Structures are given as structure tokens and as C-alpha cells.
Amino acid sequence: MKYNKILMMTVAIMGIAVFSMLGCEDVDPDAVSSEDSTAAILAVNTANAALEDLMSDMVNAEPGEAQEMMDLLDFGVPYGYYVNAHELDHRNNDANFGLALTGFVMLSQDPDLQDMILSWESYFDVNEPFLVEGSQGTMGKHGFGLPLSLDGMRLPLAPFIEAPMAMAKMSIDDVPQFSQFQGLVDSLFLPVIESSLEALDAIDDSTDYVFIVSPAMQGEPESDPIEIDLTEIFALEMGLYGLKSVLNTVVAYNFDFVSFDSVGIVTELAQDSDFATLKSNGGERLALAYA
């Protein structure tokens, strides 16, 4: 009798354990409460309204200086709301798309990047852009295999890649060390591109997803709304992957000069110099670019 009681208790305990494990399997770790889902929608609506105001101001503005344009590109407010919406509900496609869009444009607000761009503007105030007599540019006439023009890249993100292309054409005697830009690529550009790609990837399976670009976002209140669907999103992802490849190629090589005079130029162009040679991790970066 005692044996039977122990057996029955054991079976009961095992049954409870199995039931508990089955119950755990039914719990979705990515589940979002209805309250959080509703709050995410409200945050997206607020972000869209802030984006409308910002885009309208940008379209109708006529900035004359680089700093004025960078101030207009302050997407911090809508970006903050998209981040909040994503934290509340990571499945909200509008939050993912807005996070990817504004996060990438937010690059313009980085202070180190602003300092570099403003230094370029100062240079072009006293030099003719792109056509400096007697110089082939920091990447040489043919760019060492890298594209030196937007036509050579064919990417739908021209505003974001004009700056590095401009840097490639600037006079050797006036540009900062190219490693300064390469450092920003590693610490700023590539992490943001990865984050944007991750957010866009979350939308890929939503075949009916559409983001509405309102007339206010276009800066023309009487225009018709524009629909952005997966076609444009795939094109944007393609552009980001292309830019990621180019940037990984850019950081693979050494383009610094020991000095910015004739001696430095002769030194770097000598046969045994390290100019235009692979860095210690250059092979790894080119493999990433290839992938």
C-alpha cells in the first residue's frame, strides 16, 4: 500500500512538471501587451507628425551654409518617438521603417562629422571644388578601384555618399588625414547602417505593408500622398548593402600621408611605401565588402 502511494505521488509530480513545461512552451517571449501596442501606435503617430513638420521646413528652406542645412536635418524628435514606439512594440512596422529612415539621416547630427563637413566647406570657400590644378586627388586619377563619382556607384542614396566622394577628390595638400574619415566609418556609419538594415529586415515579410508619405512631408499641402511599399524598401535595403560594401572597402586601405608637402608625396608614392596598401585587417574588411 505504501509503495502504491509513493508511485502515485511520483506520477502526479511528473505530470505537474510536464504540464508546466508544456505551458512554458505556449508563452511567447516576444509577446506584446495590448496596452504597449496601443501606446506604440500613438508614439508612431506623434513621430509622423514631427516628421511632417521637419520635412516641410526642409523642403521650403533655402539654406546658404552647410551648418544651416545640418541644423535642418535634426531628426532627433521624430527619431526619439520611433525609438519609443519600437521599444513598446518591436513588431510595429511603421516604427521599424521610421527608425531605419530617421536613424540613418541622424548621422548628420554627429559632432565629429559636422566638424569634418564644416572643414570641407571652409576649404571650398577658397578653392574651386573638385578641380584643383596639379592634383589627382587623394585616391589618384582612377580611385584605386573605388568609385569617384555618383555615376560610378549607382546607389539611391546620393545625398549621403556625396561627402566621401568629395573627400576623394580634394587636394592632397588640404584634406585632413583620410584615417579620420575611416574612423567615423567604423564608429558611426557602419553601426547605423547595420541598425537600419535590421529594422528594415523586420518588415520584409509584411507583403502588404505601406508607409504613407503625407503631403506635409513632401512640403506641398496640395499634393497627393505617396505610398512606399516593399518595392521601395527593398531598393533602400539594396542601397544600404551597397553603401556598406563601399565603406568596408574604403576602410581596408591606408590613404594617409606622412606629411603634406612634396617630400611627403614622394615618400608615399615610393615603391615600398604603405600608401594604398591593405591595413592589418584589410583582407577581412574586403571579405565583408564582397559578402
Image (spheres, rainbow, N blue to C red):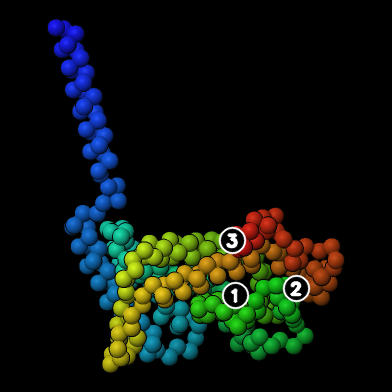
Which numbered disc covers residue 164?
1
Percent x, y of residue 28: 27, 47
Between the residue at mark 3 and the residue at mark 2, the CA separation in whole angstroms equals 36 Å
Specify the amino acid type for callout 3: Ala
Amino acid residing under circle 1: Pro
Q: State the residue lying farthest toward the right.
A: 271
* Residue 222 or residue 224, whichever sits in front: 224
Where in the figure is residue 252, as x and y percent of width and height?
66, 62
Query: In this rendering, would 255 be left or right of 189?
Result: right
Spot occupied by residue 193 in the image (x, y as percentages of width and height): 49, 65
| Residue drawn where x is 75% and y is 82% of the image | 135
Tell me how far mark 2 sits from mark 1, CA to CA. Answer: 20 Å
Residue at the left extreme, as displayed: 1
At 19% from the left and 8% from the top, the residue drawn is: 3
Can residue 34 be seen at all in this image of the molecule?
yes
Indicate which label's residue lies in the foreground, 3 or 1. 3
Q: CA distance from mark 3 to mark 1?
A: 22 Å
Q: Which dot marks residue 291?
A: 3
- Residue located at (72% from left, 72% from top): 144
The mark closer to the camera, 3 or 2, is 3
Closer to the chain start, of discs 3 and 2, is 2
Q: Residue beneath label 2, please?
A: 260
Pointer 2 or 1: first along the chain: 1
